[in-house]
Amino acid sequence: MSTALVPRALLPTQIHPSELTEPVRDAFDALMQRADMAAVGFALSLYKALHREAAALVGIQLPACGELAVCTCQDCICGRIFDACDARFYMDGTVEFVQCPGCSDDHRIYGDD
């Protein structure tokens, strides 16, 4: 069995977690948790490197901004992994949630007004 390299332009720009195996999802979650901790400590080079590694792990293009987001929409809990620049944020109490473009288009949540 040979492994072919896929040109970056042919990689998808987002992926749904149901398309990933459980070990890959777990590894992705661990990378994103490490990236969050790096951001808290202002280790931005590490933060970017972890997002790059996470994108490669799940097989999507690294966005131009170098940052991934995970949809945490309370309406459908889709979990889509996508370009953070396309994220829409809303607050529910003191908790911030993220909507991917699909959720935002289909069922926009405004949170606390």
Image: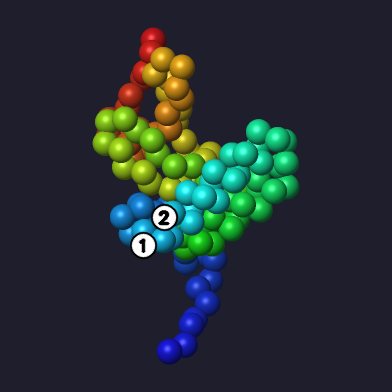
Does the image show residue 24?
yes
In x, y percent, where is residue 3?
48, 82
Count of labels in the image:
2
Residue 1 vs 24, above or below: the answer is below
Q: Residue at x 47, y 63 (%)?
A: 59
User: Residue 56: x, y in percent?
Assistant: 54, 62
Q: Dot 2 lies on which element? A: helix
Characterize the local packing of mark 2: few (<14), some (14-19) or many (20 or more) Cα atoms within 10 angstroms. Answer: some
Q: Is residue 78 left or right of residue 29?
A: left
Q: Which of 25 and 48 is in front in this view?
A: 25
Please name the amino acid that badge 1 sits on. Thr
* Residue 60: mark: none
5 relative to 49 in the view: left or right: left
| 23 versus 32 height, above or below | below
The colour scheme used to paint the residues is: rainbow
Q: Residue 25 carries which label?
A: 2
**The N terminus lies in quadrant:** bottom left
- Picture quadrant where residue 90 is located: top left
Residue furthest bottom in the image: 1
Residue 64 appears in view = no
C-alpha separation, residue under disc 1 versus residue under disc 2: 6 Å
Dots 1, 2 in contact, CB < 8 A: yes
Dot 2 amino acid type: Arg
> Where does the image place residue 100, in percent across and percent down from the top left?
40, 39
Side of 29 relative to 72 (left or right): right
Q: Element under label 1?
A: loop
Q: Sort mark 1 into few (<14), some (14-19) or many (20+) by Cα contacts within 10 Å.
A: few
Q: Considering the image in quadrants, where does the C terminus appear?
A: top left
Residue assigned mark 1: 21
- Is 4 situated above or below 25? below
Write the residue at 59% across / 50% down.
51
User: Going 69% across and 48% down the picture, which residue do you hit?
Assistant: 46
